[in-house]
Amino acid sequence: MQSELMRNETHSVGECSSSTSLSSQRDIEDDRMIAVVLSEEYAELDGAVARRLSNLAPVPHVPRINSYIPNLSDASLDYQRLLQRLKVYGLYEVKVSGDGNCQFRALSDQMFKSPEYHKHVRKEVVKQLKDCRNLYEGYVPMKYKKYYRKMSKSGEWGDHVTLQAAADKFAAKICLLTSFRETCFIEIAPQFEAPKREFWLSFWSEVHYNSLYEIRDAPISHKPRKKHWLF
C-alpha cells in the first residue's frame, strides 16, 4: 500500500510551499512536546490496550469511502505522529502487508492472531454490505452494486464503510489509534447490538492499517526484541 502511495504521490512533494513545510515542522515539534508530557503522565499505566487509552475521548465515526490520499510529505509527517502515539501509550503494531488488503489483514490478525485469513474477513464484510444494503448505501456516492463488487476484489483498499460493516458483522467495537492531528482515537461500534469483543487497529491515516496490541499481549511469533520493539 505504501509503495502505491509513493508511485502516485511523489510528484506532489515539490508542490509544498516553504511556509507549509515550516508549519508542518512546528506541528511535529508540538507533537513531540505533547508526547514527552504524556509519556511522563502515563509511565505507570498497565493493562490492556483499552485501559491504556481510557483517557481519550473517542471521536464519533462517520462511514465514508476513500476519497483523499495524502501526498508523500504529509503522509511522512502523519506516520511520525502515529509512531509517537504508539510510544506514548506503550503499544505495539503487528505489521501486515501493504498489498491493498491491510484493513482486512489487520482485522484477521485481531480475530485469529494471523493476518492470513483476510480473504475470509473480506468475504464476510462484503456479504454484510450486500445483505444489509439499507444500512450503508447512503454513505456510498456511486452505484451501490458497483461499490460492493469492487470491495469483493483482493487488493481493493478497505474504507470507513467496510469498517462499519465489519463492526456490525462481527458484533465488535473497532478502535482506531490514528495519525490524524486532531483525531487521535476513533471508535466504530455495532449499530444494533452491544459489542461482544474489541478489535484494536493502528491507522496511518488513509494509507495503512496494522493490528495493535499491548506489548505483552502481542502474539508470541510477532513479539519483538526488548530493544527497538516500537520500530
Image: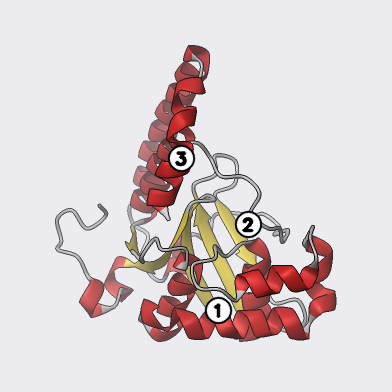
- Classify 10 Å Cα crowding around label 2: few (below 14), some (14-19), many (20 and above): some
Left or right of residue 100: residue 186:
right
Nearer to us in this view, 15 or 178? 15
Query: Closer to the observer: label 3 or label 1?
Result: 1
Question: How far apart, in angstroms, are the residues tagged by discs 3 and 1?
Answer: 26 Å
Q: Nearer the viewer, mark 2 or mark 1?
A: 1
Q: Residue at x 62, y 77 (%)?
A: 166
Label 3 sits on a secondary structure element that is helix
The Cα atoms of the two marked residues, 2 and 1, are separated by 26 Å
Element marked by disc 2:
loop
What residue is shown at x 40% (from left), y 51% (from top)?
2
Q: Is residue 41 above or below residue 210?
A: above
> Looking at the rendering, in which quadrant would you find the N terminus?
bottom left
Displayed quadrant of residue 218? bottom left
Query: Which residue shows up at 51% across the image and 16% down it?
Result: 17
Residue placed under numbered mark 1 in the picture: 122
Residue type, numbered disc 2: Pro
Query: Is residue 160 in view?
Result: yes
Which sits earlier in the primary sequence, circle 2 or circle 1?
Answer: 2
Q: Position of residue 109 (x, y in %)?
A: 40, 77
- Image position, residue 121 (x, y; %): 52, 82
Which of the marked residues, 2 or 3, is nearer the chain's N terminus?
2
Residue under label 2:
58
Q: Which residue is mark 3?
A: 75
Per the image, label 1 sits on a secondary structure element best described as helix
